[in-house]
DNA sequence: GTAATTTCTCAAGTTCACTTTAGATCAAGA
DNA sequence: TCTTGATCTAAAGTGAACTTGAGAAATTAC
């Protein structure tokens, strides 16, 4: 009677149970525990997970998503304005990303068939962003 | 007098020397060796690297890029039609990706302010793609 | 009440895309 | 020639995002 099990959540979101536990360690969900120590989730957790999944599709790293979510109330359902604030921020990210890809496509259109890809001349090659000095580890595939 | 050193290539592409060696293990470049065993690159290697960097910006995994490049001549400059073939394939990927993001944005537009994000109703949440059963390891952030 | 599921924790493994380290060799400038 | 800097190889480390495995306890189904 008091909430969803982790299995329920997995079934509804399509996520693996292990993934949901992993997300918990990153602060994306905050389940309560029942008498036996099992996690119990509410509808707000379902929303938080959905939101995280959407944000991931936009290419945001988990840490960023968690940071966004940190502003939301933990055990209560967030208000409309809570979601609106985050959604709006995400919409901006999305538009930036779309614009980047479109620029890339247009450059590619200009290049197809020319075979140039010369480092000095090609617009595709020189996107003008600073790629250097991002530290160790794999770089994010799509530059944000 | 016979070609560029790995340092030259790094300077021109902005890649780390170690990254260029790593790409070699994936078949993206195929340098020759001088008498002392040092790598020597030609202009075609520069083009191959540029192309790989562009493809990465599009979110293609290295393995896919290498597969595309496998069709190109290794030690000669590729022909115009070689590049055109690959570029065209990439353009299609790009357009698919842009369309996905636009759908996502439009859905988000419909949702901003409503605060729903309900799993059953929200178009954002149910992208209709099969997310399950992709095996171990991290999943690619952006679904191709 | 017993068997079958599910869940628990915690540590270790996996993939991708690289970087770092170590010790040795090669190349180039003063 | 000497020395500084670039390059070599091979192995191990890194960060993100999870998964897998083991052994135990809780829950559910019959």
Image (cartoon, coloured by chain):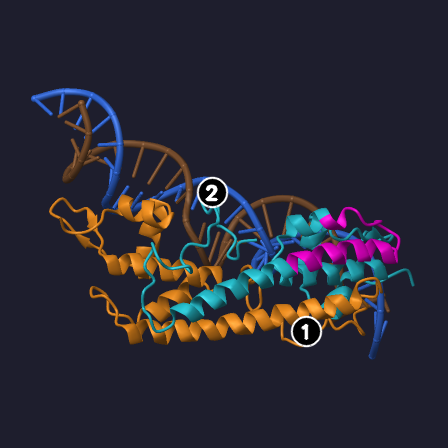
Chain colours: A orange, B cyan, C blue, D brown
Which chain hosts label 1?
A
Front in this rendered view, residue B123 or A96? B123
The residue at the point 57 percent across, 69 percent down is A98
Front in this rendered view, residue B33 or A129? A129
Left or right: where A102 falls relative to A27: right
The answer to whether mark 1 and mark 2 are in CB contact below 8 A is: no
The residue at the point 79 percent across, 66 percent down is A111
Q: Which residue is mark 2?
A: B136
Q: Position of residue B36 (x, y in %)?
A: 83, 53
Q: Quadrant of residue A102?
A: bottom right
The residue at the point 81 percent across, 68 percent down is A118
Q: Residues within 10 Å of mark 2 (few under 14, many from 20)?
A: few
Q: Quadrant of residue B12?
A: bottom right
Left or right: where C30 falls relative to B27: right
Left or right: where C4 falls relative to B24: left
Q: Quadrant of residue D1?
A: bottom right
The residue at the point 85 percent across, 62 percent down is B43
Q: CA distance from mark 1 to mark 2?
A: 34 Å
Q: Which residue is mark 1?
A: A127
Vertical order, D20 against C17 (above or below): above
Q: Main secondary structure of the magenta part?
A: helix
Left or right: where A7 falls relative to B101: left
Disc 1 element: loop
Vertical order, A123 against B96 (above or below): below
Magenta stretch: give its range: B68-94
């Amino acid at each position: 009677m008091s909430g969803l099990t982790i299995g329920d959540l997995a079934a509804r979101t399509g996520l693996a149970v292990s993934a949901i536990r992993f997300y918990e360690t990153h602060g994306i969900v905050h389940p309560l525990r029942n008498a036996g120590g099992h996690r119990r989730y509410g509808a707000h957790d379902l929303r938080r997970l959905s939101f995280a999944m959407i944000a991931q599709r936009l290419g945001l790293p988990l840490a960023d998503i968690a940071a966004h979510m940190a502003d939301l109330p933990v055990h209560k359902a967030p208000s409309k304005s809570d979601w609106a604030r985050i959604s709006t921020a995400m919409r901006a990210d999305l538009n930036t990303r779309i614009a980047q890809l479109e620029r890339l496509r247009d450059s590619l259109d200009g290049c197809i068939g020319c075979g140039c890809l010369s480092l000095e001349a090609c617009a595709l090659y020189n996107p003008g962003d600073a790629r250097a000095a991002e530290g160790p580890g794999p770089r994010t595939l799509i530059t944000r």
